[in-house]
């Protein structure tokens, strides 16, 4: 056996052991009472509060991001999700009474929420706290035990989560595993009661394949190319500022980042000149670097092969940065227009009309988000009714995720399932259908041979 084989076997044993421990805790039933769930949520809040500066340092080490940006993008939203869940959990855990029919009367029907069991959460590196802990909030609120794998690409934050999180929650019920692709694969081999994966569409397909073996339900939070449609009647200055702001967040490394712009021809010159001003202005407030050399090389390839006119996009190999780039009229088959960009490069294509923009979007895989800038209700309706995406932002980009009870998730190639608030609780909950009948009356007409009176029921 080679060294690699041996370490793989060790890793698999270890992940399987951690799964078994989480599963054993679930079997005791201790995670079901609301008191346990509340204690876990309070523990998560203490973890974030006690470790806030360590979290900021870890994310700075992983991504070069400043502490204020980390507060706004990772720490603040996690805190908000925990507090929102704590405030409403007592409502979510209640059974829902369901009206019965003449054929089922007398009786009482209800749907009863119960935890699914032991769930896997595979986080992503771009918001390494948020995308690991936010699903965990929902999983614990729903009474599950969990095996959590932070992304190996944001390794410093992953180590921090592995070291500090178990100290603040039920450390047997929440198992943290660290490791790379082999660890993810070993995890996906286990019979989880739900798998929650955040990552690329390509790996999402592998996750679903692995889950099929055990019929594990999956939530796939994937990526894709989120378009921005700018109509001729939009406020171009505000549109440019908001697009540039959204694109600058985390160096463009966000799953709901605007990926490319479709602009009506008549306002193209005004939008291009406003973007050329706004893109560098917004980016100067974000210190996030490209996460690693592999991703920097990927962005270099996108810049080298687009075939359009490029403004900006200077690569600093030592600092792992790319200055904001606007690329007008890239070749439609270039990687820039076919692959998710996940970096500070914004392609812009002009279209003769909003209807043409809708067709352009519909010719491609369904995006995670779609943004529309328009001053007209009719144009808004044309876009909303004519396209399908995980979420939509009208006259703003990315803010939709800040509304706690809006479902967050993709559709088609951008994923399946949803979370945030009640939607997250429901994702990790099985709603069990129950009907209780009284013993009496025990009507003879309900047994064969059936009389004609049954037809009236
Ligand atoms: P990725 O899919 O390459 O990797 C995700 C995880 O999958 C990694 O941690 C890795 O351990 C595991 N993995 C990789 N190859 C595997 C394999 N062959 N078998 C089993 N597991 C494997 O994604 P990434 O580069 O870490 O993240 C970027 C992607 O994630 C982008 O597409 C982005 O849009 C998406 N994303 C989506 C959301 C969302 O909420 N929808 C959020 C953040 C990122």
Image: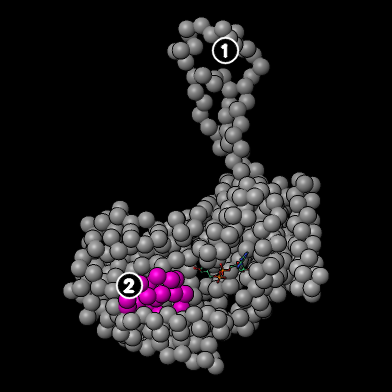
In the image, 424 versus 14, the foreground residue is: 14
Instruction: Please tell me how crowded label 2 is: few (under 14), some (14-19), or many (20+) other residues with Cα within 10 Å.
Output: few
Q: Which residue is drawn at 37% across and 75% down?
A: 334
Q: Residue furthest front?
A: 1
Q: Is residue 101 visible?
A: yes
Question: Is residue 115 within the magenta segment?
Answer: no
At 56% from the left edge and 19% from the top edge, which residue is drawn?
Answer: 106
Residue at the disc numbered 1: 446
In the shown orientation, is residue 172 left or right of residue 118? right
Q: How far apart are marks 2 and 1 (CA)?
A: 66 Å
Nearer to us in this view, 18 or 379: 18
Q: In which quarter of the image is the N terminus?
A: bottom right
The residue depicted at 66 percent of the width and 17 percent of the height is 439
Q: Earlier in the sequence, mark 2 or mark 1?
A: 2
Give the percent coordinates (x, y) of residue 450.
53, 8
Q: Position of residue 445 (x, y in %)?
A: 56, 9
- Quadrant where ligand 1 appears: bottom right
Q: Which x, y percent locates residue 15?
A: 75, 62
Q: From which residue to which does the magenta span run?
A: 330-347
Residue at 58% across / 46% down in the picture?
A: 92
| Quadrant of res 448 | top right
Residue at mark 2: 332
Mark 1, secondary structure of its residue:
helix
Query: Is 338 one of the magenta-colored residues?
Result: yes
Q: Is mark 2 within 8 Å of ligand 1?
A: no
Q: Is the magenta stretch mostly helix, strand or loop?
A: loop
Q: Kindly report which numbered mark, 2 or 1, lies closer to the viewer in this rendering.
A: 2
Q: Position of residue 449 (x, y in %)?
A: 56, 7
Q: Which of 259 and 235 is in front in this view?
A: 259
């Amino acid at each position: 056996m080679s060294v690699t084989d041996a370490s793989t076997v060790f890793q698999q044993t270890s992940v399987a052991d951690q799964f078994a421990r989480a599963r054993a805790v679930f079997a005791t039933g201790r995670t079901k009472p609301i008191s346990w769930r509340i204690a876990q949520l309070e523990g998560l809040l203490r973890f974030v509060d006690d470790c806030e500066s360590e979290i900021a340092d870890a994310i700075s080490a992983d991504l070069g991001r400043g502490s204020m940006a980390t507060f706004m993008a990772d720490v603040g939203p996690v805190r908000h999700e925990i507090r929102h869940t704590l405030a409403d959990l007592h409502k979510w855990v209640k059974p829902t009474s369901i009206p019965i029919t003449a054929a089922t009367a007398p009786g009482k029907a209800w749907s009863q929420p119960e935890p699914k069991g032991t769930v896997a959460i595979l986080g992503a590196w771009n918001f390494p706290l948020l995308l690991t802990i936010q699903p965990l909030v929902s999983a614990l609120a729903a009474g599950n035990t969990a095996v959590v794998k932070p992304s190996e690409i944001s390794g410093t934050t992953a180590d921090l989560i592995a070291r500090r999180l178990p100290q603040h929650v039920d450390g047997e019920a929440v198992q943290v595993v660290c490791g790379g692709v082999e660890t993810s694969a070993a995890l996906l081999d286990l019979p989880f009661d739900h798998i929650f994966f955040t990552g690329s569409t390509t790996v999402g397909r592998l996750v679903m394949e692995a889950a099929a073996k055990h019929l594990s339900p999956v939530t796939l939070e994937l990526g894709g190319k989120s378009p921005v449609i700018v109509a001729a009647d939009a406020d171009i200055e505000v549109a440019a500022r908001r697009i540039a702001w959204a694109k600058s967040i985390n160096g463009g490394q966000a799953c709901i980042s605007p990926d490319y712009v479709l602009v009506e021809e008549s306002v193209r010159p005004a939008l291009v000149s406003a973007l050329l001003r706004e893109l560098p202005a917004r980016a100067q407030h974000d210190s996030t670097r490209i996460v690693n050399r592999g991703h920097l090389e990927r962005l270099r390839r996108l810049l080298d092969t687009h075939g359009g006119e490029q403004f900006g996009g200077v690569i600093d190999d030592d600092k792992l940065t790319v200055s904001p780039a606007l690329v007008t009229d890239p070749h439609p088959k270039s990687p820039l227009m076919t692959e998710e960009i996940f970096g500070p490069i914004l392609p812009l294509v002009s279209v003769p009309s909003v209807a043409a923009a809708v067709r352009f979007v519909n010719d491609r895989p369904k995006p995670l988000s779609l943004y529309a800038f328009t001053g007209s209700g009719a144009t808004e309706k044309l876009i909303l009714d004519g396209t399908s995406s995980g979420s939509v932002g009208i006259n703003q980009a990315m803010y939709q995720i800040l509304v706690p009870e809006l479902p967050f998730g993709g559709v088609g190639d951008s994923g399946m399932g949803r979370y945030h608030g009640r939607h997250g609780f429901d994702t990790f909950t099985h709603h069990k259908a129950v009907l209780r009948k009284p013993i009496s009356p025990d009507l003879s007409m309900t047994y064969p041979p059936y009389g004609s009176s049954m037809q009236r029921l």
